[in-house]
Image: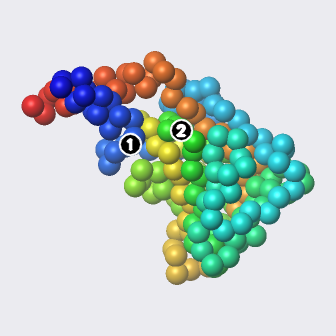
Amino acid sequence: MNSVKMSVVVVASLSGSAFAVVTGFTDQGAWEAAAGGPAVVDDLSSYGEVTLTLGSNSFFNGYSVDLDGVGTGGANVNSGGTFVFTVGGDLDSLTFDFDAPILGFGGSWLNTFVTNGLSLTIDGQTLDIESFVPTPDFEFVGFASDTPFSQAVLTVTDPGGASEFAALTDVLFVVPTPASAALLGMGGLAMARRRR
């Protein structure tokens, strides 16, 4: 009976919780270190030119991109290997849905921040990407969590405001190694013991 309880605690600790702390980074090396790197890098060049559709777009390596709204916001991977999209207006949200829990999500971002801003939500914590990318250039921005997560959701900062154009040249994510997953599981066991 105890082994069943212990297994449930480990699974619960790996699935994410409201206690996650998500931190933003503009230095890729520091981000990889915080997320327990190294990162898996999808440079988007292997897909060719493709237009995304509403719902799940599951042709990406290690993740899918889900579009929610009444339109796609022009979401596509262009011939140069750049993922471009406009959130707001007809596209309410764009969700990166990872095949396995990860500890870090990032990319080389371009955002014009014309009027509204772009927000990223991970495990219930929302961060404003604009505060990490001060200029309209491609710059690395990554987010690391102390708890594994499976989704990263992009929305506009003010849903009633204007739409925001953004682009990514790379998608990076960090999958926990078996050793780090075991440590997280041990932390969950320790917390469960302490609550008794």
Residue type indicated by callout 2: Ala
Residue at 90% from the left image edge and 54% from the top image edge: 79
Circle 2 residues within 10 Å: few <14, some 14–19, many ≥20: some
Comparing 57 with 126, the one in front is 57
Q: Nearer the viewer, residue 105 or 5?
A: 5
> 136 or 33: nearer the eye?
33
Marks 1 and 2, how far apart at CA: 12 Å
Q: Residue at x 37, y 27 (%)?
A: 184
Q: Secondary structure at mark 1?
A: loop
Q: Position of residue 191 (x, y in %)?
A: 21, 30
Q: Is residue 182 left or right of residue 117?
A: left
Residue 160 on image: x %, y %: 52, 81
Task: Name the element at disc 2.
Answer: strand
Return the residue at label 1: 16
For image coordinates 25% across by 28% down, the residue present is 4
- Say which quadrant the N terminus sits in: top left
- Asked whether residue 82 appears in the rendered view, the answer is yes
Q: Is residue 115 visible?
A: no
Above/below status of 29 relative to 114: above
**Residue that lies at the very extreme toward the top in this rendered image:** 179
**Residue type pointed to by label 1:** Gly
Q: How is the image coloured?
A: rainbow
Q: Which residue is mark 2?
A: 100
Q: Residue 30 in the image: x percent, y percent?
A: 57, 30
Q: Residue at x 78, y 45 (%)?
A: 44
